[in-house]
Image (cartoon, helix red, strand yellow):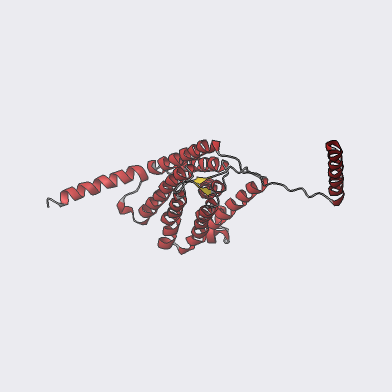
Amino acid sequence: MHLSLPIDRVKSTVDSFLETLFMATADSGSSYVQILLSAASMLLVFVSAILLAHRNDLGWWTLILSVFVGPMISALQYDLLGLIYAIPLLLLPIFGLWRFSQFKLNGKFTREVTKTPVTLWSAVGMVVGLILLVALRFGPFLFNSGFLTATPEVWVMYFADAAIFASFVMIARGVREGWLLLAVAAIADLVVYFLISPMLGMLGLYVFIALAGAYGYFLWRGLPAQAAEPVQVELDEEEQALQKAKQATLDKVNAKTEK
């Protein structure tokens, strides 16, 4: 009896804490687990962003873990069709890990990242990638017109969630503007959660992610630009002949001068 009282108090405190932060309690079943998984995933995204702002390779492993903790586990536990979205999402940090490895290693985990400018094709590719990720997020609903009934808030949330992870593709390539995309996507999610379900825990996480995006953008301001590849201009036969003739003339003049 003496033990049950402290346990009840702890459970009551935890329930109160969770209800305050995430509007859920341990008795709310699967929704409680999904909310905590989503929160843990976003927390890992924040940690990943901080690490990558310092060009640390460990950030990619943290981002891979965030996909496992969030979309992957949710799909495996509740709906295997969610793997249609989770697996491609997992490929993004894996690509980032590979792409970051192309930069020179400075120390144990830090990379010497060079700044890459945004091009028209990279911007178009990002837009197409976001559309594909959102389409995969809808899954089977894309084929039975179920997505047409989605509210504007759902559309914004799906695009914002996709942009949070897709922004790391830009970061992996050394595109500084990827940090701005991360910050904007986090703010969009923040607004949606504030309007439809103001969970203080999720709101706080998205605030931190937005700040991490701004922090990364600030830290990367001094990155060196990507070195341009030397362009070798091949001279045609006439130009080569003219150069040889000029050189021969100069040699003769120099020889006469020496005499």
**Is residue 24 at all visible to an observer of this figure?**
yes
Residue 81 rendering spot, x and y as whole percentages: 49, 63
Q: Is residue 102 above or below residue 222?
A: below
Q: Quadrant of residue 221?
A: top right
Q: Is residue 232 left or right of residue 66?
A: right
- The residue at the point 43 percent across, 54 percent down is 65
Q: Most extreme residue toward the left, as rendered?
A: 2
Q: Is residue 21 left or right of residue 213?
A: left
Residue 109 rendering spot, x and y as whole percentages: 45, 48
Residue 62 rendering spot, x and y as whole percentages: 43, 51
> 182 or 139: which is nearer to us?
182
> 176 or 245: which is nearer to us?
245
Could you tell me how many numbered marks the image carries? 0
Residue 37 rendering spot, x and y as whole percentages: 39, 53
- The residue at the point 84 percent across, 47 percent down is 244
- The residue at the point 54 percent across, 44 percent down is 113
Q: Is residue 88 left or right of residue 248?
A: left
- Quadrant where the C terminus sits is top right
- The residue at the point 40 percent across, 40 percent down is 204
Q: Most extreme residue toward the bottom, as rendered?
A: 80
**Is residue 159 at all visible to an observer of this figure?**
no
